[in-house]
Image (tube, helix red, strand yellow):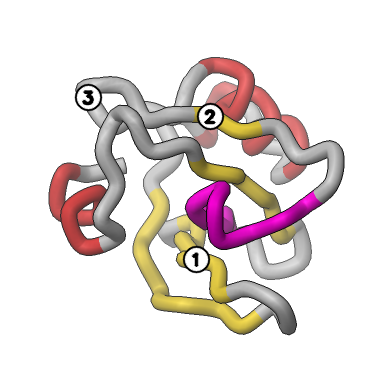
Amino acid sequence: MSSSALKSLALTNFTPVIVSVDTENKRIGVVKQDLAKIPNASTVRPDKRGYLGIAAGKMVVDKLALTDADLPAKFTYVGKIDAGTVFWHAFELAKD
């Protein structure tokens, strides 16, 4: 995540977040763990560079079926998405 995205979402490297993948719209959803009570969800913490970790990256690549030719993938912030009980911050796969 870019530093501006981290700043606007009020995330630090100490903020646990949950990452979700919307395969239909090719989006990644990010929400603070304390705002989303999702059973069996794995949390990650952004590192000092804003990376969400290898496991989260592999999950995104696998679920969106990205190939080596698609990488590195760039995502653009599209805003908050209402998922009923929580607002996810959505990032959409940028088109070339």
Residue labelled with disc 1: 90
In this figure, what is the number of numbered marks? Answer: 3
Identify the residue at horizontal 59%, vertical 29% (top origin): 56
Res. 57 image quadrant:
top right
Tag 2 or tag 1, which sits nearer the N-term? 2
Q: Amino acid at mark 1?
A: Ala
Tag 2 or tag 3, which sits nearer the N-term? 2
- Label 1 sits on a secondary structure element that is strand
Identify the residue at horizontal 40%, vertical 74% (top origin): 78
Residue 14 is situated, as x and y percent measured from the top left of the image, at 33, 30
Residue 85 located left or right of residue 9 = right
Residue 61 sits above or below residue 83 on the image? above
The quadrant of the picture occupied by the C terminus is: bottom left
Residue 63 is situated, as x and y percent measured from the top left of the image, at 76, 40
Residue labelled with disc 3: 49
Q: Residues within 10 Å of mark 2 (few under 14, many from 20)?
A: many
Q: Residues within 10 Å of mark 3 (few under 14, many from 20)?
A: few
Residue in front for this viewpoint, 93 or 44? 44
Stretch of the chain drawn in magenta: 27-38
Q: Circles 3 and 2: CB distance less than 8 Å?
A: no
Residue in front for this viewpoint, 75 or 49? 49
Q: Amino acid at mark 2?
A: Val
Residue labelled with disc 2: 44
- Label 2 sits on a secondary structure element that is strand
Residue 2 is situated, as x and y percent measured from the top left of the image, at 22, 44
Q: Amino acid at mark 3?
A: Arg
Res. 37 image quadrant:
bottom right
Numbered disc in front, either 1 or 2: 2
